[in-house]
Amino acid sequence: MLKLFKKEHQTIHPIPIQIPYHIMVSLQEYYNKFDTWQTPDFSEKCPICGGVDCATFLGYYVRAAICPQTGFYVSDLPILRYLCHDKGEVRVCDHVTFSLLPHKLVPFRRLPLNFMVEAVWIKISRSLSFTKAVDAIEGELNHLSDVADCISISAIMSWQRLILSALAQFLPSNIEMASNSHYDQLQDASDLKVFIEILINHQSPNCNHPIRGPDAFAWDFYQQSGGFDQNAVFLFGRASQHKK
């Protein structure tokens, strides 16, 4: 059963494990409708211990979220949080709470995955210098003024490292999410350009509400690598449960 809640349910508790959450809407719509958002029900199986009627809605915490492409910027995007009562037989981690991170976001980053990938694509596909890439990204992808400083040379380098790290994780995974020809290209050269092309063109076949692009690729990778049943890892970024 789903239940409604209000923003006064904000709580402060130890850092939870993070699970991707397919919100089926934009970040802005998720934020605007949050006061009447229906919380997912985990009564059949707790993501932490596998117990029945174990995980209960605990509240939420807030974090910043910035999408220069859509002009969306908030400092208090709510993230749903649940408490495990340890009724199951097998625990996937030592945490006692878990949170649902909207699938458009990357752990511990303010910018959506799609924006970061598209920004790096502008630089890589056009063979631009970092300085010219900043100008191009500002001109084509940014519709914000007061947080435009999030687009910089160091930021682009950070986004590029994020994608390279994901590629290094994807290659040995043996998860079939690319064509044989693309996979061969990636194996031979670890080609960042080819990988970004795959990310941008990917369409998820496994969602009730279809998604495409980097969001879809990250979502499918998480699901195909086991989902929370096997304590899967995010392809982009390191969730709290995997930080040391």
Image (cartoon, grey):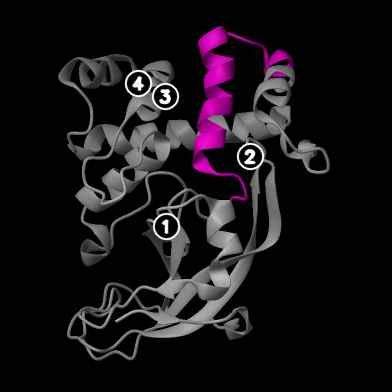
What is the distance, in whole Å, between disc 2 and disc 4 at their CAs? 32 Å
Q: Quadrant of residue 11?
A: bottom right
Image position, residue 128 (x, y; %): 63, 10
Image mark for residue 196: 3
What is the distance, in whole Å, between disc 4 and disc 3 at their CAs? 11 Å
Residue ID for mark 4: 190
Image position, residue 108 (x, y; %): 57, 55
Indicate which label's residue lies in the foreground, 4 or 1: 1
Query: Of callouts 4 and 1, which one flags the residue occurring earlier in the amino acid sequence?
Result: 1
Q: Is residue 183 above or below residue 26?
A: above
Q: Is residue 194 above or below residue 89?
A: above
Residue ID for mark 2: 70
Image position, residue 72 (x, y; %): 67, 47
Secondary structure of the residue carrying tag 2 is: loop
Q: Is residue 108 visible?
A: no
* Three-letter amino acid code of the residue under disc 4: Ser
Residue 35 among those drawn in magenta: no
Q: Residues within 10 Å of mark 4 (few under 14, many from 20)?
A: some
Q: Which contiguous range is marked in magenta?
A: 109-133
Query: Of callouts 2 and 3, which one flags the residue occurring earlier in the amino acid sequence?
Result: 2
Residue ID for mark 1: 23
Residue 213 placement, left or right of 108: left
Q: Residues within 10 Å of mark 2 (few under 14, many from 20)?
A: some
Q: Is residue 7 visible?
A: yes
Image mark for residue 194: none
- The residue under the point 17% across, 34% down is 176
Looking at the picture, tell me which residue is in the foreground, 143 or 132. Answer: 143
Q: Residues within 10 Å of mark 3 (few under 14, many from 20)?
A: many
* Three-letter amino acid code of the residue under disc 2: Thr
- The residue under the point 63% across, 35% down is 69
